Image (tube, rainbow, N blue to C red):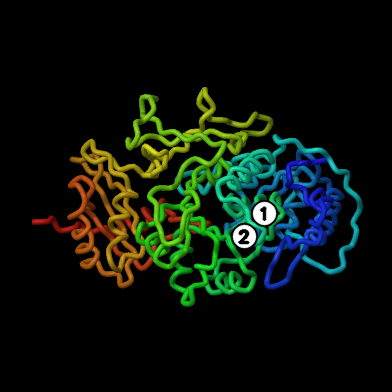
Amino acid sequence: MDHDGLSVLEAIREPGVASQAALIEDGRVTSFGELAAQVECVASSLAAQGLGPGCRAALRTTCDVGTVVTILALIELGVALVPIHPRLTDAEVRVITEDARPDLQIQPFIRSDNLPKSGVFSRTTSTPSTPLAILYTSGTTGRPKGAVLSRGAFVASATASAKNLGWTPDDRWLACMPLAHVGGLSIVTRCIEARRPIVLEPRFDPDAVLRAIRRERVTLLSVVPTMLRALFDADRDGTLATLRLVLVGGAGAPPALLEEAAARRVLALTTYGLTEACSQVTCQPLRAPGTTEPGSGKALPGVDVRTVLENGTLAAPGDVGRIQVRGPMLMSGYLAGPGEPLRTSLTVDGFFDTGDLGALDEQGRLFVHARRTDLVVTGGENVYPAEVEQALEALPGVTRAVVFGVPDERWGQIVAAGLALDAPDPARAAALVAEASARLAPHKRPRLVAAVESLPLTASGKLDRARAIRELSPRLSPVPRRP
């Protein structure tokens, strides 16, 4: 038997759980008892197809009841989920399946009121080290890597989140993120473990999300900054202020966006996380709505976060270094070749180097500056794109900014910027850059700029930096020098 909280067949043995709401989609409620019956049916069917402990199954995921039922059936069987985002091309899917080598590619369960029994499956005892999912990193800077995440890692992540945010009896978490990504999948595991309802929206549509929040009395929401911006634009009656909290992760949130959240009395808590750690590793603590706090919060309970200089020594408070994390929610490792052990990349004392650059202040709050691959070095000076992007995004008319380095014979690199403007115009873009430059040190000032209507995003709603750089580079023009 499994006692980590992720088995719905075990959950319904607890007093009162079977009748509680588990999933809500388009106004239709599925109780934990009904969910368990559906999961048992799907698990039996998959077992009859040869799936069992140690197997892998590729599943094209959407954010609906059928996908959640199928994921939970795989958990019951001890089968590792290999989620496939529905927006991936056939070529992108092949990259994942050729690397993960799933035993079976399956389709989500289709909900039915008449559940045929398709056999019986033998329940197995999973351990904390049993792989629950193999999630692929976004791949915006290279070939995606499969991170193997165990049951124990997801449970540890859920426990850490609960200790930071707590649960109330009325909590309902709305999932509108792709379940192929760690943020969406973590909502499922957290809510199942806590016996709380998940409100499912198959795709992110601001008006639909706001209607669901009102109709289903949602209290918790997870979004990336671009999603929160779209929700603010659509929220004309204060719906978002009825939420207990909004978690904002996946990318650096512009300060102006967080200030707007405070003005709207929306408690927006910024987080920092990564696929390799089952989502969050830091998060801001609960506080009163209408207030803001800098940074991405402190390390969650059970998580260690540190910043390290290039020589391996710990960075002093306020100094930028490589962000490293340690805790039970870390992945087991990356997939390697057939028959080869997982590839791990931990330090001798068990820390994972995230590849990101940031600083911890005296209070232990994390400030994320850039990914190491994004760092611009011009004339020997380090420029962190996030800092310049925030300065640009604070200007009127700039909806999003991306900053990157362009090779330069004299300086090594010079700073370039792409601006998404409500009315794209090269001259206006240059004027805006000049305005922001007045608040930036000389080496941080963009020397080249391009104006566009919008910047490309990944399937998870994050800025697709690699694609943006490819598309913007041919369109860059010089910014006139300040007199």
The residue positioned farthest toward the front in the image shown:
288
Residue found 70% across the figure and 34% down from its top: 129
Labels 2 and 1 touching (C-beta < 8 A): yes
Mark 1 element type: helix
**Percent position of residue 78, x then y:** 77, 42
Tell me which corner region of the image, top left, top right, bottom left or bottom right, holds residue 39.
bottom right
Q: Which mark is residue 191?
A: 1
**Percent position of residue 329, x then y:** 60, 38
**Percent position of residue 59, x then y:** 69, 54
Is residue 196 visible to the viewer in this orientation of the structure?
Answer: yes
Mark 2 element type: strand
Q: Mark 2 is on which residue type?
A: Trp
Q: Mark 1 is on which residue type?
A: Cys
Spatial distance from mark 2 to mark 1, Cα to Cα? 8 Å
The residue positioned farthest toward the bottom in the image shown:
236
Sort mark 1 into few (<14), some (14-19) or many (20+) by Cα contacts within 10 Å.
many
Q: Which mark is residue 173?
A: 2
Is residue 46 visible to the viewer in this orientation of the structure?
Answer: no
Quadrant in which the N terminus appears: top right
Viewer-side residue, 202 vs 411: 202
Residue found 78% across the figure and 63% down from its top: 31
